[in-house]
Image (tube, rainbow, N blue to C red):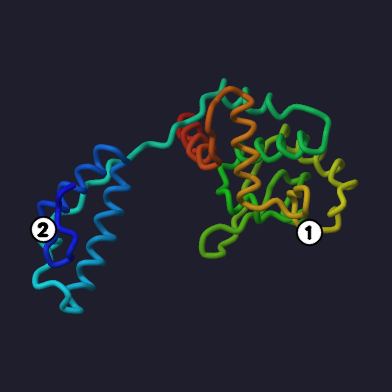
């Protein structure tokens, strides 16, 4: 774009022009990341005496605009549950995962880390390991009990049935990425577009507060 390529010749105005371009074409968080990367680069160049002055000292970081996570409505939740209905192993697993997400608002990593021993269908609770390896108990409803029970019966015939992990995929434990794919696939089948697991957490919190929580 006609700007100098040598580090010591790059001006603050050139960097501002670049960051403005990023703001115009990408999210504000991306522009902020580019700013921080450039700040580290030019700070290193200054320490190594590759440049005589640091142009980043005259540039303020781009402000990151908070983007609220979309909350799923009751109709959308019903639609994604409907997309997972069926009697096969995959359908029963996916429905149990979705219902547990909706009822508890657990994080993706917490869902993926569940073992069979962590779930008590009689007490209708699951023990999850959250941030900082802290354990907490989350309750869930009768329909989720039914969904998990049906999944566990289907799970008995899985080749990895002896594994301790609750959720199984084709080759054993269903990891974070596999659970994300379950949510993405069922969301698209329900006509909801790109759905990610964290939306269930926000939806859980929204509905909980709406009901007086």
Q: Which quarter of the figure has residue 35?
A: bottom left
Q: In the rendered view, would you say 50 is above or below 17?
A: below
Mark nearest the camera among 1 and 2 is: 2
Relative horizontal placement of residue 115, taking residue 108 as reference (left or right):
right
Callout 1 secondary element: loop
Asked if one can make out residue 169 in the rendered structure from this viewpoint, the answer is: yes
Specify the quadrant of the image occupied by residue 183. Answer: top right
Front residue of 158/133: it is 158
- State the residue position of label 2: 11
SS assignment at label 2: loop
Residue indicated by mark 1? 164
Q: Residues within 10 Å of mark 2 (few under 14, many from 20)?
A: some
Quadrant position of residue 142: top right
Q: Furthest residue to the top?
A: 75
Residue at the image point whose x is 62% and y is 24% from the top = 190
Question: Residue 5: horizontal and vertical position, in percent?
Answer: 19, 60
**Please, which residue is most extreme toward the right here?**
157
Image coords of residue 159 (percent x, y): 87, 52
Q: How many marks?
A: 2
- Please tell me which residue is depicted at 20% across the width and 72% down the height of the picture: 45
Horizontal side of 91 relative to 58 (left or right) equals: right
| Residue 100: numbered disc | none
**Image point 90% across, 46% down: which residue?**
157
């Amino acid at each position: 774009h006609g700007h100098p390529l040598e580090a010591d010749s790059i001006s603050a105005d050139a960097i501002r022009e670049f960051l403005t371009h990023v703001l115009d074409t990408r999210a504000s968080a991306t522009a902020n990341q580019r700013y921080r990367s450039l700040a580290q680069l030019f700070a290193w160049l200054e320490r190594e005496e590759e440049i005589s002055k640091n142009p980043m000292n005259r540039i303020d970081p781009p402000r990151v605009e908070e983007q609220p996570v979309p909350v799923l409505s009751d109709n959308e939740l019903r639609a994604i549950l409907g997309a997972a209905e069926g009697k096969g192993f995959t359908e029963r697993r996916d429905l149990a995962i979705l219902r547990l997400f909706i009822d508890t608002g657990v994080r993706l990593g917490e869902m993926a880390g569940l073992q069979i021993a962590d779930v008590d269908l009689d007490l209708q609770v699951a023990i999850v390991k959250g941030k900082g390896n802290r354990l907490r108990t989350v309750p869930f409803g009768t329909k989720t009990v039914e969904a998990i029970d049906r999944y566990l019966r289907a799970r008995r015939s899985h080749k990895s049935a002896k594994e301790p992990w609750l959720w199984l995929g084709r080759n054993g434990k269903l990891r974070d990425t596999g659970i994300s794919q379950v949510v993405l696939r069922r969301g698209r089948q329900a006509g909801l577009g790109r759905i990610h697991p964290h939306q269930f957490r926000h939806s859980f919190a929204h509905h909980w507060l709406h009901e007086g929580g």
